Structures are given as structure tokens and as C-alpha cells.
Image (tube, rainbow, N blue to C red):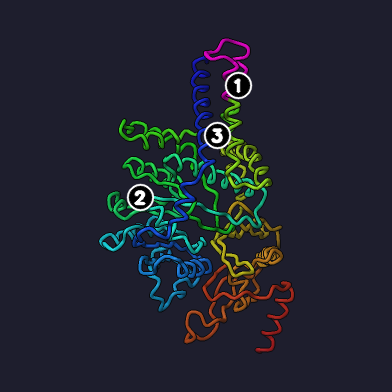
Amino acid sequence: MELILDILYIYVAIYSLYFLALAIRNLNDKPFRIEKRYSQYEEKDNLAVVIYARNNRITLDNLVKELKMQDYPINNFRVFVLLDNCSDGSDQLFNGDNFVNIVNITGVGTVGKDQAVSMLIERLSKDQTIDSYVFIDADRSIPSNFLTSINSGLVNHSVLSGETLIITDNLGPIDKVKAAYQKYHMNFMRKARSLFGLAASADSGVFVIKKDIIDQIGSVDFKDINTELKYSMLLSKIKCPCTYNPNIQTYVDTASYEFRKPRLSARLDLFKNCFTQITPNNFGFAEHTFSLLNPNIWMILLVYAAVMKHSYRYYFFVDFKIVALTFLILIAGFGISLINSKLRFREIVLLCLYPIYSLGHIIKNLPPVRTVRAKITKIEELPEGTEKLAIDAFVMNTAGRELPCKLEFISEGGLAKIKFMYKNKKFLTGKHLRMIDALQEIRQKLYDYGFVLKICSCCKYFTSNVDGSTNMLKGFCNSDYPSPSITGKKPTLIWNSCTDFEPAKVTNLLEEMVEEQEAQSQSH
């Protein structure tokens, strides 16, 4: 037990000194300010801007317009748009626009960002006119100096990640806490490490890499946050570490942004694999490997509490005063780190609540708790005699922005209900006699918040098929989609969707049935 406490104290004491060093270094970010001031005068690289889109029609259109307004020479960059099985008409946005090179992936389902990007890289591998790749998600927005800042950052570094600025409108309380922590982490931890010349983790949302490095490695790895971290370690190993640059900024709406963090188990597995590959002549890779062991705030507090109690009462290899001093160094480091973190007072308060969120997240993901949650969820969602149909759908806000969501149509004991899911938010209707009634409850709930569900039942071209069935799941589509030459009503179901969607007026279900019956009687 004594030996374990000794090791743990050495660990947190070293981290406290490291944290203070980062906090002091972050006070002077002059190198980034100088780089930004003289960015226009650097020799211009030829950039291939690769945009990955998956039903991001509105933000994609805006992003391409922002690229056209860059202060970077238009002859020094090309734009490639990867449309991954898009069903929102994104492929029609740039017809006849020579500024954009479209790669439309259809007929094979959704392949994902990693495979889509790999396909394009393979296609461009023999193009000797490209100096560097710029990967960016279609849900981002960029300032006019975006490419100029990238070009300036590439002068001294071969791989770059940038700052993501989250538009925090309409965030829930938990997401506000996470957003404050993310802002602090970028403006302090990532920036300070960069000022020290230390490696950063890759972020596929905005990622820059020179073409010769990709040619050397063979591909990128953008499957998820854990593989991005693994890819970052590979870059450090070949002495081309990813470097964080706060001058490279992108903006993202809260509805499109997902807070991501590598799992602890993934970091520990990666540490074990990388530790055996550390060599004396690659300090950057060694430091990046040990940075995988960054402790959680609760671990630091618990270790200090245990060591302080033990050293105060019993013999310890260092005096209690030294233990207290290193703890004060940690606190001082936190205070200094706030000075240049660009956090407002309210965000600092939210940041101080992050440990509470972190504790709840840890408890929630403990194996026994996960097992109990899985069993309870399964019992609640799938009792005996329950039928369930899950579909992917979209909701549109008042600006026409499409947001991916899921719907579960549930039939339980002869009653119908629908579960609406968006990210970590869920809404479950009450039990209804008919599925169409449950859907009406969902429609009205979303309408009250300024959203429209993009499925056939909510489209103005849809009419119900009053066939005597209880749930009224069938209907007809009266639009000209996909071609005016197709005449007559086309059978459809209430949860289907297409690109010719136009919102219908939200009315009472009884009114809809009366209107349909009147229309049918007039037709006879």
C-alpha cells in the first residue's frame, strides 16, 4: 500500500508541475499573433479542400460560398465535395459550377467519412499539383482568412488541427458545461502544448496534412474519435506530429456538433502498444505517449486527499508540507490557466461544474451500471408482445436546416406510441389507439419548438389512405417527384421521405380526416 501511494504521489506531483508550466507558457501566445499578422506574405501552397457531406445541403451551400470569398488566390486551391449517399438534393446544388468537383457516392449505401475520404485520396494520389489536403466537414462555417491561416501554419508544420468555435445558442445545461470545458481545453491545454512544440490529437472536422505525408502513410483514419487518436500517435511516431493552431478557426452550430472524447480503455490500450515502441531519439512520440495517461480531475483530488491524510498522520517519503505545496502548485496552475483561456465569467462557473458532470459520466459508464441500464432499457422498450420499427429521418428548423434524428414506431399491447430521438435527447409519446394519433402528438410537439418532421405524413403532397385500418399507415404522394411524366397517385407510407418534401400545415387530426372524407365524397 505504501509503495502504491508513493507511485501515485509522484504521478500527480509531476502532473501538477507540468500543468503549471503549461499555464505559464500559455500567457504568451505571441508566436500565433505574429504568424497571423504576416500570414498574407507567405508563399502560397496548392491546397485540395475536401468537404465531407451527409445530407448537409444548407450548410454545404454556405460553406462553398465562404470558400469562394476566401482571401486566398483562387488558382491555388481546388474544392472537392464528397456526397455520401445524400438524399436531400445536395447533388443538384452545384450543377454547372466549375468551382466544385463533386464525388457523388450512391448505390452502395452510406460508406462513412473514412472510406469516402480514402476513395478520393486514392484518386488524387498521382496528382502532383497538390501540396496539401484540407479536410473539413460540411456542417462547418469559416472566416475569409481560413485558407490563408492554413497556408501560414504549414510553413513550420506538416500536419495541423484547428479551433472549433461552438455556437452555443439553445444548448441544454449539460451541453453548456461540456462546451465551456471544450473552450477551456482548446484555449489553454491544446494551445499551451502547441506553444511548447508538443503534439495534438487530430480532429477530422478540420484537419490539414501535406500530401507527401499521406503518400508515405497511405491513408487517413477518420472512423471515430478513438481511431483519430491512434492516427495522431502514428504521425508522432514518424516525426510529423499534428500541431494545434488557434488561427485556423471553424464555426459549428450546436445542433450539428457532437462532443467527443476518447474512451479511457482506448487510451490505455493505445498507451500499452505505443510504450513498447518508444525510442530515445523521438522525444515527441515519447511525450505524446505519456500524455495518454492524463488523469481525470477526480483522480487527482482523490490521490492528493489520500496522500495528505497519510503523510500528515504517518511517515511518508516526503514531508506533508511538500505534498501540500505541490497541491497548491496545481491550484495556482489552474488559476493562471484561466487568464488567457478567453472564458467569460459565466463560462468559468460552468467550467467549475464540469467535475460534477465528469463524476456522473464515470458512474454511468461503470460496467455494472452499464449492465443494469441495458437490462432496464431492454425491459422498458421491448416487453413481451411489443413490435418496433426504427427509421432514420430528419427534422427541419425555421431556417430550413436539416438535422438527423431517429423515430421508433412502437406497438405495445394493442396501443401505439412513438419515440423521437435526437442526439442524447428523447421524447416518448403517450399511448394512443392509433399510430397516426401518436405521430400527430410528435408533429405538434416539434411544431411548438419551431421544427418540422421531414416524413411523408408531414408533407403537403401526402394524403392519407382511409382504408379502414386502425393505424392508418398508408397514403398517397401527389408530387411530380421524381418525374412529371409519372402520373397518378403513388402509394407510400407515413414514415417515408424524399427530396421533394414541402411542409404541410399542421392541423388537428380530426380536421384532416374530415377534409379527406369530404374530398373523397366530392370525387364520387
Q: Earlier in the sequence, mark 1 or mark 2?
A: 2
Q: Residue at x 37, y 34 (%)?
A: 286
- Residue linked to disc 2: 158
Q: Are marks 1 and 2 in contact (CB under 8 Å)?
A: no
Q: Main secondary structure of the magenta part?
A: helix
Q: In this view, does 282 lie above or below 130?
A: above
- Regarding residue 309, the answer to whether it shows in the image is yes
Disc 2, SS: loop
The tag on residue 43 is none
- Label placed on residue 324: 1
Is the C-beta separation of discs 1 and 3 under 8 Å? no
Magenta residues (range): 303-326
| Mark 2: few/some/many CA within 10 Å (<14, 14-19, 20+) | many
Residue on which disc 3 sits: 296
**Where is residue 422 drawn, in percent x and y?**
60, 57
Q: Which amino acid does label 2 sit on?
A: Ser
* Picture coordinates of residue 222, whole percent (x, y): 41, 52
* Helix, strand or loop status at disc 3: loop
- Distance between mark 1 and mark 3 Cα atoms: 19 Å
